[in-house]
């Protein structure tokens, strides 16, 4: 239990005690001194001793109470001690005055020293208090700095984690999903993360991913709002602390009904091209600061690099598996796909068709009109075959002017329909040669799995045989 008696209380108690002692001495000397003066020898010595004691008390009171209380105590002592001293010898009264004056001077001296010491102590205490306040402020500031540094380190570690994760992903869709998830983890569960990508066809924004906290509305404008369009147009980041008060924007329509009150948006830029837009918004005003925007900038830059790497990888992969002239798969990749489909069909029991397609009289056409015209014919064939392929189908340039078409989940009747569509469209699509239209035809051989074979090479051999029969029967036909 802490001590409740402060130095000031202790001093007041001592002063009260000395006052009681002082007045008790004066009263006793005044009342008893006269009555015993005739019966006790050398009573003046006793009285002077008492006077000296009273003077000492007076000096204490003077030094602690100050000048005015000291003078009042002195006058009270003169009044009370005048009678007993006069009853003995008047000269003792003079001695009393001398003694009291000596003690008064002592009390005054000690009072002055006490005041100076008190003033010095007060200044020292104020200095100590000021130093304590400065130290406390410094410690609070250091604590705030340490806390802020801890948050920055935590944020940097999260950013490193994002870089490590998306740096090894080579599919753009997976990169976008990981970036959106990690951004949502960084900026809190009551916010909303929107990730837009730029359409290669239209050049506009398309909302790819939305992650939102509990109670947040879905973002209705799938093509992006005014903030997202502004960022894409100006190719720089945007921080809005209050969407209704920002003079740069007039929020209306779907954007006005949205629950976003503050937001920050980062364009995903690579080599001057905008790949997408990353946006974080909150239902509260003033949530985001420049520090959070810097964090989003880093996330966006990491995402842009990863997206560009994924696109470069995809293009490299396409160059490795696609023919540069026709845009169709190369022979090696087609054989791998055919091998996979044979194994899958054996497990599932499904069927598929293989169409072997050859351009009729291509060598003569190429020799007569030149290689440039021959390339144009091959490119036209590639476009027609791509247009006939369904999801999962594989079309390849099998070699020279020969093409292979792998149609999944079809029977013989449907395979023949596809072959006829290809034959008819090729015949109906002439090629311009020296400002004149020249027709091109194809012959097609069809084989069906598992009716015509259960091995890859058997399926190819049967399709080749059918193609040979079509050529032998006069070309521009299907067998």
Image (tube, grey):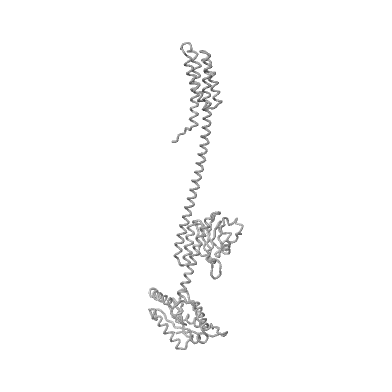
- The residue under the point 46% across, 82% down is 400
Q: Which part of the image, by quadrant, shows the C terminus?
A: bottom left
Residue 89 versus residue 81: which sits nearer the camera? 89
Q: Where is residue 127 in the image (x, y as percent from the top left)?
A: 52, 39
When the figure is inspected, residue 116 is found, relative to residue 228, above or below; the finding is above
Q: Which image quarter holds the N terminus? A: top left
Q: Horizontal and vertical percent for residue 235?
A: 56, 63
How many numbered badges does the structure rendering display?
0
**Of 105 and 38, the residue lying toward us:** 105
Q: In this view, does 101 lie above or below 466?
A: above
Q: Where is residue 348 in the image (x, y as percent from the top left)?
A: 39, 73
- The image shows residue 108, relative to residue 134, as above or below, that is above
Residue 151 at x, y = what percent? Answer: 48, 53
Question: For residue 69, what is the image quadrant?
Answer: top right
């Amino acid at each position: 239990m802490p001590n409740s008696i402060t130095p000031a209380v202790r001093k007041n108690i001592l002063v009260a005690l000395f006052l009681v002692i002082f007045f008790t001495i004066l009263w006793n000397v005044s009342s008893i001194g006269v009555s015993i003066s005739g019966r006790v020898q050398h009573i003046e010595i006793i009285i002077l001793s008492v006077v000296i004691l009273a003077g000492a008390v007076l000096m204490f009171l003077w030094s602690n109470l100050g000048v005015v209380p000291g003078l009042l105590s002195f006058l009270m002592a003169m009044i009370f001690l005048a009678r007993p001293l006069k009853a003995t010898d008047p000269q003792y009264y003079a001695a009393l005055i001398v003694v009291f004056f000596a003690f008064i001077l002592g009390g005054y001296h000690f009072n002055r020293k006490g005041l100076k010491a008190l003033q010095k102590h007060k200044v020292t205490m104020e200095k100590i208090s000021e130093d304590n306040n400065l130290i406390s402020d410094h410690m609070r500031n250091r604590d705030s700095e340490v806390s802020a540094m801890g948050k920055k380190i935590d944020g940097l570690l999260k950013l490193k984690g994002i870089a490590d994760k998306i740096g090894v992903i080579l599919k753009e869709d997976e990169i976008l999903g990981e970036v959106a998830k990690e951004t949502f983890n960084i900026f809190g569960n009551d916010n909303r993360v929107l990730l837009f990508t730029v359409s290669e066809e239209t050049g506009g924004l398309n909302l790819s991913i939305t992650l939102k906290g509990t109670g947040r509305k879905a973002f209705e404008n799938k093509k992006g709002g005014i903030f997202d369009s502004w960022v894409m147009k100006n190719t720089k980041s945007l921080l809005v602390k209050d969407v209704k008060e920002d003079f740069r924007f007039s929020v209306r329509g779907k954007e006005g009904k949205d629950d976003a009150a503050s937001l920050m948006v980062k364009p995903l830029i690579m080599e001057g091209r905008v790949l997408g837009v990353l946006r974080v918004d909150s239902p509260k005003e003033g949530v985001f600061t420049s520090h959070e925007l810097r964090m989003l900038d880093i996330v966006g830059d990491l995402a842009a690099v990863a997206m560009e790497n994924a696109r470069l990888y995809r293009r490299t992969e396409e160059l490795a598996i696609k023919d540069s002239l026709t845009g169709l798969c190369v022979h090696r990749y087609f054989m791998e796909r055919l091998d996979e489909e044979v194994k899958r069909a054996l497990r599932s029991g499904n069927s598929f068709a293989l169409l072997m397609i050859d351009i009729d009289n291509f060598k003569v056409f190429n020799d007569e009109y030149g290689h440039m015209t021959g390339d144009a014919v091959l490119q036209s064939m590639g476009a027609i075959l791509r247009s006939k392929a369904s999801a999962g189908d594989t079309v390849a340039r099998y070699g020279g002017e020969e093409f292979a078409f792998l149609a999944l989940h079809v029977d013989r009747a449907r395979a023949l329909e596809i072959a006829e569509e290809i034959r008819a469209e090729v015949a109906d699509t002439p090629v311009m040669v020296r400002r004149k239209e020249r027709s091109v035809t194809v012959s097609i051989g069809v084989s069906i799995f598992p009716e015509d074979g259960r091995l890859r090479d058997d399926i190819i051999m049967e399709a080749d045989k059918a193609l040979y029969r079509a050529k032998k029967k006069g070309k521009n036909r299907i067998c």
